[in-house]
């Protein structure tokens, strides 16, 4: 007899609190800049709501209701479509460039970042592909061909890596490859492949870091924070000032002084520093606890999943959200080198928020599947 599990209300409640907290912080961080540029304090908040949160909730609800078997079937085509869209960013008049990077598609009144979608479609593809290989081997009672799987996995990584390095968007590639490796090994692949991945990663870093001097400088600043405080080290210096200024209880929402021209990327990559300044250690700790609850519930959903595809998908989505959170907070506090990674559910950007909510919808969908 099969029974339907209840939707994970703890996960749903946690995400709802994170989204509410995120909207308040975006309203606080963006008000002054929005007033200066557009004559209203709500422009950026409205953009985040109408092009990120609201469509994200609608698509997330769709992901919650859709049949997971259908998602598994269409996952390879979704990944292929995403690859084609990634190529389109290099087409003149279709792709948009900013700050030396070409990462966006011009969709009339709005822009879209295909690499954000890739975080989800690649997880979907890997979960579908690896689970199908396992199921086919079990049905036919054949020994798994690990070498063939490894080669196919490396080819997929190479294609994704090439497109992201051309943009360039190395930070997104770090997230994608890290989560991909986690999903790969959770599918039961040999442990010795891990050493191969570490070797390839180390060699790639040695080759690619000199090609972009700013990457080397970021690592240098991480090792010696006093290096170039008015240049490449300026952002982390201002971030640490923001975090330190918050103290235990924070200065209060809207009171941050660092966001007004001192802290670079205060609405996106550096938003955790503003959170720490305005809500203090207490607010920052609550934020981290909420993400840890997300981690616990996500892994719990994965563990209780009744099929390999759902299990790999749940582990992949949870690992992606938490790894991105850890890297963002780590880079803002000086624990990790500075990277351009947005904080999930908080950083300004409709593309990222929309895709994150679709991922949450899929997690909640898995949580209610029959057992």
Image (spheres, helix red, strand yellow):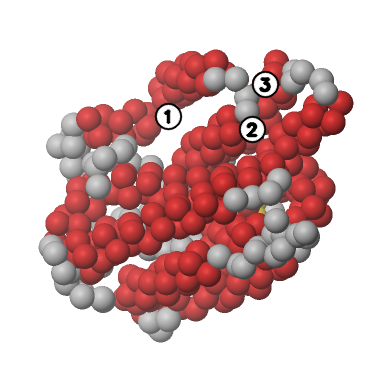
Q: Position of residue 280 (x, y in %)?
A: 19, 65
Which image quadrant is residue 301 in?
A: bottom right
Task: Work out whether residue 7 or residue 359 is closer to the camera in this orientation and state it.
Answer: 7
Q: Earlier in the sequence, mark 2 or mark 3?
A: 3
Q: How many marks?
A: 3
Q: Residue at x 83, y 23 (%)?
A: 141
Q: Distance of mark 2 from mark 1, alpha carbons?
A: 35 Å
Residue that appears at 84% across and 31% down: 139
Secondary structure state at the residue bearing disc 3: helix
Please give the residue where the numbered disc 1 appears in the rendered image. Answer: 212
Mark 2 / mark 1, whichever is N-terminal: 2
Which numbered tag is attached to residue 150?
3
Q: Position of residue 101 (x, y in %)?
A: 52, 44
Query: Can you say whether 323 is above or below 13 in the image?
Result: above
Pick whichever, 307 or 149, lies toward us: 307
Q: Decide: marks 2, 3 in contact (CB < 8 A)?
A: no
Image mark for residue 187: 2
Which type of secondary structure does the marked residue at label 1 adopt? Answer: loop
Q: Is residue 238 above or below residue 309?
A: below
Q: Tell me which numbered mark, 3 or 1, is placed earlier along the sequence.
A: 3
Residue 178 x/y as whole percent: 51, 35
297 or 289, which is in the foreground?
A: 297
Q: Residues within 10 Å of mark 3 (few under 14, many from 20)?
A: some
Task: For marks 2 and 3, give the CA distance.
Answer: 12 Å
Q: Residue at x 48, y 20 (%)?
A: 198
Q: Quadrant of residue 277?
A: bottom left
């Amino acid at each position: 007899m099969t029974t339907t599990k209840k939707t994970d209300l703890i996960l749903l409640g946690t995400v709802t609190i994170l989204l509410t907290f995120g909207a308040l912080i975006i309203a606080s961080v963006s008000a002054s800049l929005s007033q200066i540029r557009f004559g209203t304090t709500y422009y950026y908040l409205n953009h985040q709501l109408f092009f990120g949160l609201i469509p994200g909730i609608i698509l997330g609800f769709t992901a919650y209701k859709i049949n997971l078997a259908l998602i598994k079937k269409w996952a390879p085509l979704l990944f292929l479509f995403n690859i084609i869209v990634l190529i389109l960013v290099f087409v003149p008049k279709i792709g948009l460039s900013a700050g030396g990077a070409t990462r966006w598609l011009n969709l009339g009144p709005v822009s879209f970042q295909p690499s954000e979608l890739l975080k989800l479609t690649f997880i979907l593809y890997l979960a579908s592909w690896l689970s199908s290989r396992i199921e086919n081997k079990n049905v036919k009672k054949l020994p798994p061909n690990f070498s063939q799987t490894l080669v196919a996995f490396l080819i997929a990584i190479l294609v994704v890596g090439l497109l992201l390095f051309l943009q360039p968007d190395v930070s997104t590639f770090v997230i994608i490859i890290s989560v991909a490796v986690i999903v790969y090994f959770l599918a039961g692949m040999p442990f010795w492949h891990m050493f191969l991945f570490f070797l390839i990663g180390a060699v790639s870093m040695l080759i690619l870091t000199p090609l972009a001097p700013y990457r080397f400088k970021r690592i240098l600043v991480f090792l010696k924070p006093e290096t170039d405080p008015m240049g490449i080290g300026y952002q982390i210096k201002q971030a640490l000032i923001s975090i330190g200024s918050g103290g235990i209880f924070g200065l209060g929402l809207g009171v941050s002084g660092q966001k007004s021209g001192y802290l670079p990327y205060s609405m996106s990559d550096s938003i955790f520093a503003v959170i720490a300044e305005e809500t203090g250690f207490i607010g920052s700790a609550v934020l981290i606890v909420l993400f840890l609850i997300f981690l616990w519930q996500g892994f719990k959903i994965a563990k209780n999943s009744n099929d390999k595809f759902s299990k790999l998908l749940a582990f992949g989505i949870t690992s992606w959200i938490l790894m991105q959170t850890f890297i963002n907070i780590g880079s803002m506090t000086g624990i990790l080198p500075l990277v351009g990674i947005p904080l999930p559910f908080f950083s300004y950007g409709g593309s990222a928020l929309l895709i994150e909510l679709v991922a949450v919808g899929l997690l909640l969908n898995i949580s209610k599947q029959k057992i």
